[in-house]
Amino acid sequence: MSRFWSAVVHGLTPYVPGEQPRLPNLIKLNTNENPYGPSPRVLEALRAEIGDSLRLYPDPISERLRQAIALRHEVTAANVFVGNGSDEVLAHTFQALLKHDAPVLFPDITYSFYPVYCRLYGIRYREVALTGSFEIDIDDYLQANGGIIFPNPNAPTARLLAQTEIERLLQGSAGSVVVVDEAYVNFGGVSVVPLVSRYPNLLVTHTLSKSRSLAGLRVGYAIGHPVLIEALNRVKDSFNSYPLNRFAQAGAVAAMEDQAYFEDTWHRVVESRQRLVTGLQKLAFDVVPSTANFVFVRHPRYTGAELAAQLRGRGIVVRNFQNPARIASYLRITVGTDAQCEALIGALNEILNGSVASSPSSALS
Ligand SMILES: Cc1ncc(COP(=O)(O)O)c(C=O)c1O
């Protein structure tokens, strides 16, 4: 606390990002990054950006990138807004579209950045409880609201909400903006981007951090009706005209264009997820059905904190949330390569059964 701080700063409880430990040989399964590197075409595009042109500002409206995203999603560039990670896109969305008299609604268990933005921008919000099996029940959202936002699949539960249900919500809440945060949709989920042409109140956000292996580049985007996009641009140009530097724009264009690499890596992650789920179930874990690049699990005999600490002692980092209390017993585990998943299963077997699995891969098969 300091008398130099603006009043709003005293009331902030900032988001705490997952740890980025700098330990050698660590198996890092705590922040839902892709275990595979970016497309070689991305690396080539980044190298090509090194040169004299760095003295010039980048394109403030990221025209090429917005065109590449539009092409991929069969919309127009006027439907696309890009930002420095989808976190920035979401921050602008809260300020531009979700600040009204009625509270914005989001699940009680969800991406914990949402309430942080609300406190930053002075937005009223109401948390809507997920069902006992961690599902979003659309009927609970059909109440007065200043906007609705949820990830699909949800984080950290990994559960997917059916497109028909989202459409029911869009119809039942036509007077306010519905934001579907599709950070994890590209691991077997169904995107609602095609609904944008029919619902002017729908905004869909995506990130290149997960399925396109570019968490380090910081690129995210939103797709919606041009009127919604204009609101985002007004906020962006009142904040930072150049949120995406030359590397981010060039690398992201290459990533959006290399569809074959994208398809190959997300399929590999989904196959590993299936093997990981089977391995965890063999060890008696309760696994919430996942359509994401992570799984949400608990063990009947151990607390989440205990397991996370024991895994860390074995060089494997996963995430455990102590809040809300309802999920404190769970671990959120990013799907790694098969070798990383095998190491995880081997370590869990050792922790739970006090023995080293004779062949870790046999627990996974
Ligand atoms: C649900 C959800 N939305 C958005 C993000 C932000 O992603 P980024 O800022 O890397 O694009 C995350 C990151 O983990 C997330 O879990």
Image (cartoon, grey):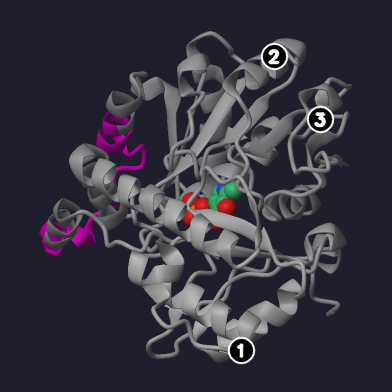
Q: Which residues are magenta?
A: 48-68
Residue 61 horizontal/vertical position (percent): 36, 37
Residue 345 horizontal/vertical position (percent): 50, 73
Residue in the foreground of this view, choosing between 276 and 69: 276
Callout 2: CB less than 8 Å from ligand 1: no
Q: Looking at numbered disc 2 in the image, what kind of residue is underneath it?
A: Arg
Q: CA distance from mark 1 to mark 3?
A: 55 Å
Callout 3: CB less than 8 Å from ligand 1: no
Q: Looking at numbered disc 1 in the image, what kind of residue is underneath it?
A: Gly
Callout 2: SS: helix
Query: What residue sits 26% from the left and 32% below the top?
Result: 68
Q: Is residue 51 magenta?
A: yes
Name which of mark 2 and mark 3 comes first in the sequence.
3
Residue 261 horizontal/vertical position (percent): 21, 46
Q: Is residue 1 magenta?
A: no
Q: Considering the image in quadrants, where does the N terminus appear?
A: bottom right
Q: Looking at numbered disc 3 in the image, what kind of residue is underneath it?
A: His
Query: What residue sits 55% from the left and 18% below the top?
Result: 227
Category of crowding for the residue at label 3, using alpha-carbon neighbours closer than 10 angstroms: few (below 14), some (14–19), many (at least 20): some
Q: Which residue is mark 1?
A: 354
Query: Is there any visible trace of residue 317 in the rendered image?
Result: yes
Callout 1: SS: loop
Q: CA distance from mark 1 to mark 2?
A: 49 Å
Query: What residue sits 21% from the left and 61% below the top?
Result: 55
Q: CA distance from mark 2 to mark 3?
A: 22 Å
Q: Which residue is mark 3?
A: 100
Q: Which residue is mark 2?
A: 168
